[in-house]
Amino acid sequence: MSSVRHALVFGGSGQIGAALVGRLRASGWEVVALSRKPPADGAGLRWLCGEFAALPALPGACDAVFSCGPLDLFSLWHAQARIDCPRVIAFGSTSMETKHAAADPDERALAQRLREAEARIFEVAAARGTRATLLRPTLIYGAGRDCNLSRIVALAARTGFFLLPRGARGLRQPVHVDDLAAAALAAFDQPASVGRGYALPGGETLPYRDMVARTLAALTPPPRLLELPSPLFRLALSAAHAGGRLRGLPPGAVARMREDLVFDAAPARRDLGYAPRPFAPRAEMFVAGP
């Protein structure tokens, strides 16, 4: 019997998925990865083109399924899938906790979908006798595809400055994509992680304002960070929205800049050997690859 392990990776070309595929291949796994726009195949890697609404033919068996895309859609697929696979490792988000009481109904709905998806995955795993682990990252960076720090970098690079309201000192724990990939791979071999969900914060806790300042300082030339009184900031924000420069910014994002969004990494350290790096941004971390 072959000792080579086989993985099926959903969202393989996304920011977490790409890092995970790289780690799996480096560890000797044979990988089948799914993406809407798949890259070229490589040694030990076969790409499938598709999405949950129109899936291609998938392998009938594998050693592990990794989900790095939308958790709700994956959970629905997982509930009806007939793949022979003993291990499921899926990424959700700490938004399940931070947005459950948000003022914006869309954010509350997102939190609800995440909770329901996690429950569905664990219930199906228990019914089938398979082993599932859920991973919940905090603020992701490192591949230039996130909607947080990479978005700030893009805006600041265009204008030469970035505006924040005074008092934007809510604590954050930015986490690098490769640390998330390492956690997912480690979970496969850790029996203690079965049936559990883990917050995956970064290795450093710092105020929102300092996180942004450190990010801008990594650019050449470094854009200026300008902190405005709340009334002036609201005017600037309204003007930016009117000009279409902040499309997709959640209504509660600015208010959360003053809130601490901090999670305990101790369970992940204990069960997964999780050891995320401190926040040391470099300019290339905020530029999307090919």
Image (cartoon, rainbow, N blue to C red):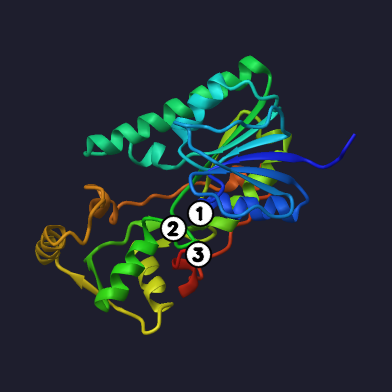
Q: Which residue is mark 2?
A: 145
- Residue 56, given in percent of the width and then of the height, sits at 56, 33
Image height of 116 relative to 89, above or below: above
Tag count in the figure? 3
Q: Residue at 33%, 39% (x, y): give it.
A: 99
Q: On the picture, is 103 further left or further right than 266?
A: left
Q: Are marks 1 and 3 in contact (CB under 8 Å)?
A: no
Q: Which residue is mark 3?
A: 289
SS assignment at label 3: loop
Q: Residue at 27%, 79% (x, y): give it.
A: 160
Residue 36: assigned label: none
Q: Are marks 2 and 1 in contact (CB under 8 Å)?
A: yes
Q: Which residue is mark 1?
A: 15
Q: Which residue extends farthest top?
A: 127
- Residue 187, given in percent of the width and then of the height, sits at 67, 41
Classify 10 Å Cα crowding around label 2: few (below 14), some (14-19), many (20 and above).
some
- Give the residue type at disc 1: Gln
**Marks 1 and 3, the one that precedes in the sequence:** 1
- Residue 244, given in percent of the width and then of the height, sits at 17, 59
The answer to which of 93 and 70 lies nearer the viewer is 70
The answer to which of 211 and 111 lies nearer the viewer is 111
Label 1 to label 3: alpha-carbon separation: 10 Å
- Give the residue type at disc 3: Gly
Image height of 216 relative to 190, above or below: below
Label 2 to label 1: alpha-carbon separation: 6 Å
Classify 10 Å Cα crowding around label 1: few (below 14), some (14-19), many (20 and above).
many
